[in-house]
Image: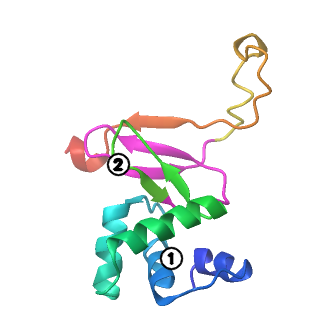
């Protein structure tokens, strides 16, 4: 059983066949699918699943804090099930591939007090950009 499915069961979230297949599609490392990609993969397992059901399920998972919505460069939103492990993202500027990365250090510590403008900063999101090996070849 995937980490996401275990978390959802632990919360008592009702796992219908449709919800389960969406959660199964989101299982794995470096998963950052768009809603349409989730739908296509889910439909491969459960042909009768509707696009609306996938969108609604993704919205619920985001609201529950079990999935993170990731937006980069105005591209379609992507869904990251790695919501409970601190990480940042590495994005290919050409194809949009996203990888989870775990830099050493605290990004909050890198922001000097004079640059906080009185904000009580609680989180930081850092996106690293570059060209992936496939696009560089």
Q: x and y percent of residue 109 in the render? A: 75, 27
The residue depicted at 49 percent of the width and 70 percent of the height is 57
Distance (Cα) linking label 2 and label 1: 19 Å
Residue 96 lies in magenta, yes or no? yes
In the displayed structure, would residue 75 be above or below residue 65? Answer: above
The tag earlier along the polypeptide, 2 or 1, is 1
The location of residue 45, given as percent across then percent down, is: 33, 87
In the image, what residue occupies the spot 75% across and 10% down?
A: 114
Above-or-below relation of 112 to 67: above
In the image, 9: left or right of 42?
A: right
Please identify the quadrant where the C terminus is shown: top left
Q: Residue furthest top?
A: 114
Label 2: which secondary element: loop
Q: From the viewer's perspective, is 26 left or right of 104?
A: left
Q: In the image, residue 11 lies at what x, y percent?
A: 73, 77
Nearest the eye: 104 or 82: 82
Quadrant of the drawing holding the N terminus: bottom right
> Which secondary structure lies at badge 1?
helix
Range covered by the magenta-colored residues: 80-103
Q: Are marks 2 and 1 in contact (CB under 8 Å)?
A: no
Residue beneath the point at 73% across and 80% down:
10
Which disc, if any, is residue 76?
2
Crowd tier of the residue under label 1, counting other residues whose Cα lies within 10 Å: few below 14, some 14–19, many 20 or above: many
The residue beneath circle 1 is: 23
Q: Quadrant of residue 48?
A: bottom left
Say which of 101 and 25 sits in front.
25
106 versus 83 height, above or below:
above
- Asked if the stretch drawn in magenta spans residue 63, the answer is no
Question: Between 52 and 83, which is closer to the camera in this rendering?
Answer: 52
Q: Residues within 10 Å of mark 2 (few under 14, many from 20)?
A: some
Can residue 81 be seen from the camera position used here? Answer: no
What's the coloring here? rainbow
């Amino acid at each position: 059983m995937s980490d996401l499915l275990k978390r959802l069961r632990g919360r008592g979230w009702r796992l219908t066949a449709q919800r389960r297949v969406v959660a199964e599609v989101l299982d794995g490392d470096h998963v950052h699918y768009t809603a349409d990609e989730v739908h296509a993969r889910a439909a491969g397992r459960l042909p009768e699943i509707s696009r609306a059901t996938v969108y609604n399920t993704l919205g619920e998972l985001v609201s529950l804090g079990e999935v993170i919505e990731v937006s980069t460069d105005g591209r379609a939103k992507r869904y990251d099930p790695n919501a409970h492990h601190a990480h940042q993202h590495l994005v290919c500027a050409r194809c949009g591939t996203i990888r989870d990365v775990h830099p050493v250090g605290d990004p909050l510590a890198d922001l000097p007090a004079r640059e906080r403008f009185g904000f009580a900063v609680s989180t930081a999101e850092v996106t690293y950009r570059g060209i992936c090996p496939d696009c560089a070849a």
